[in-house]
Amino acid sequence: MMLGTKGLAGDRGWKVSLSALMLWTAACAGSSQFDNAHQEALRDSVAHFLDVYQERSATGARDSLLEMYSEGTLRWVEDGQVRYRSVQDIADALGALPPEARIESVYSDVEILPLAPGTAWVVMGFQSKFVDPTGPTFAFGGTITMVLSHQAAGWQIVAGHASSPRSRGGG
C-alpha cells in the first residue's frame, strides 16, 4: 500500500509515508490473527529472503537482485542521505560497476521483527567485500536496516538504511 504524499515537499513526503506505515503496522501487530506461530513463520520466510538476497549479490545476479526491491515505494539511505529512490537508481549504480564485480556479504546479529502480517523490519550487522577480478578488492561493514513487504512476487525491500562506523575524532 502506498500512502498518498502529493503536495508534501521533497524527502518529507516519503518520511511521512514511512512513519504512517510504521504506525499502521504497529497497530495491526496487536491483532489476534497475528499470533506467535504466524510471527515465527514470517521470521523463517524473511530469513530465507535474506539468504537469497545474499546469494544473488555474491554471484552478481543483478537482474534477479533488482526484483527484490519494491518499485515505486523504495527509499534507501546511506550515511546520512537518501541514496536511492527507485529500483532504476539501484540498477544504474550496479550498472556502473564492472560486469564481473560482485559484493560478498556476511550478516551477523540478524533481528527479524514482524510488524504485521506481510510486514517485517530487519536489523543486522554486515561485513561486505567488493570483489572485482579485473581491479581492486576492498571491504566495508556496519549495520543495515530494512522494511520488507510481502507482495504477490514475494518479499520486497520497501525501505532500507546502511551505515558504517566513522571515527568521531576530537578530543
Image: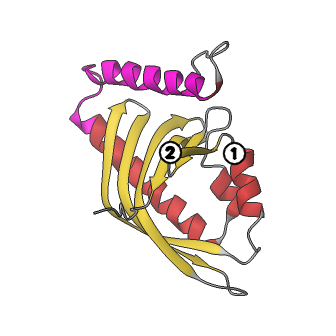
Residue kind at label 2, given as amino acid type: Gly
Magenta-tinted stretch? 11-37
Along the horizontal axis of the image, is 70 left or right of 34? Answer: right
**Distance CA(mark 1)–CA(mark 2):** 12 Å
Residue 35 in the magenta stretch? The answer is yes
Residue kind at label 1, given as amino acid type: Val
Residue 17 in the magenta stretch? The answer is yes
Q: Tell me if label 1 and label 2 are in contact, CB under 8 Å.
A: no
Which image quadrant is residue 115 in?
top left
Q: How many marks?
A: 2
Which image quadrant is residue 73 in?
top right
What residue sits right under mark 1 in the picture? Answer: 87
Q: Which residue, as the protein is rendered here, is positioned at the far top?
A: 7
Which one is nearer the viewer's eye here, 154 or 86?
Answer: 86
Asked whether the viewer can see residue 1, the reply is: no
What residue sits right under mark 2 in the picture? Answer: 160
Asked whether the viewer can see residue 70, the reply is: yes
Q: Secondary structure at mark 1?
A: helix
Which one is nearer the viewer's eye here, 168 or 64?
Answer: 168
